[in-house]
Image (cartoon, grey):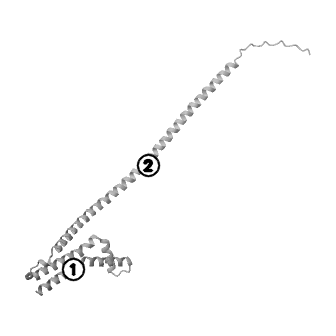
Amino acid sequence: MSSHALPDEPQLDLPADDGLNSENLNSQVQRTEEQILVLRRQQDALEQEKRELEELGRKQEQFQTGRADLVEKLARSLAVLDREITDAQKRSSLLQDIRESFGQHLEILDAINARNWNPADLHRELTKALGAVDDARSDYVRSFPKISPERAANLAGGAAGSADPALGRDFIYWLQSGFAFTLPLLALGVILLIVLVAVFNR
């Protein structure tokens, strides 16, 4: 079998566009990188905005919780303060009345001067003076527990026979206080007795 030689095929002279394709690809890569950079910046901005919104939400929640808590506490405190002020005003008025009463008794007792008594009215003057002393003592015994209710309560417990040493000390305190208060009255009684003896020995 004879072989026939094939004629050479004509070669096409195509333009070289490798350089053009490479430039387009590089341009697309650059644009893509720029878009990625823009997206990253947008993502960072969105994340920052998210953090700020979350922080704002936490602060708003803290504000609402704190305000509600303080409003409730302040309202209760105001109610307590109103009661305390009312009680304090009542106690202040009571103490003022007691002070005025004690002051009047003290003024009356200080004004008693047995040397100025008329011997003819000695019995009447002495009865009047002893009445003033009794009135002062009664008012003192009645009013002093109102000045110091804690000590009055301890005194009542001690009088009931409590074995608590603290209550015993309170009773001793009251005993000493009562003696200190009645000592001037006893001295006045002694003076009155001396005056009576001097008058009757004339």
Residue at image location 17% in from the left, 83% down from the top? 194
**Location of the N terminus (image quadrant):** top right
Q: Is residue 180 left or right of residue 57?
A: left
The amino acid at mark 2 is Gln
Residue at image location 54% in from the left, 33% down from the top? 42
In the orientation shown, which residue stands out farthest toward the left?
A: 120
Residue 148, quarter of the rendered image: bottom left
Q: Is residue 195 left or right of residue 163?
A: left
Residue 21 at x, y = what percent? Answer: 67, 21
Q: Is residue 98 left or right of residue 168?
A: left
**SS for dot 2:** helix
In the orientation shown, which residue stands out farthest toward the front?
A: 202
Label drawn at residue 187? 1
- State how far apart marks 1 and 2 are (Cα): 72 Å
**SS for dot 1:** helix
1 or 2: tag closer to the N-terminus: 2
Label drawn at residue 121? none
Q: Is residue 55 above or below residue 185?
A: above
Circle 2 residues within 10 Å: few <14, some 14–19, many ≥20: few
**Location of the C terminus (image quadrant):** bottom left
Q: Nearer the viewer, residue 132 or 92?
A: 132
Residue 35 at x, y = what percent? Answer: 58, 29
Q: Nearer the viewer, residue 113 or 161?
A: 113
Residue 183, quarter of the rendered image: bottom left
| Numbered label tally | 2
Residue 196 at x, y = what percent? Answer: 14, 84
Q: Is residue 114 above or below residue 94?
A: below
Residue 156 at x, y = what percent? Answer: 31, 77
Circle 1 residues within 10 Å: few <14, some 14–19, many ≥20: few
Residue at image location 44% in from the left, 48% down from the top? 61
Q: Which residue is mark 2?
A: 62
The amino acid at mark 1 is Ala
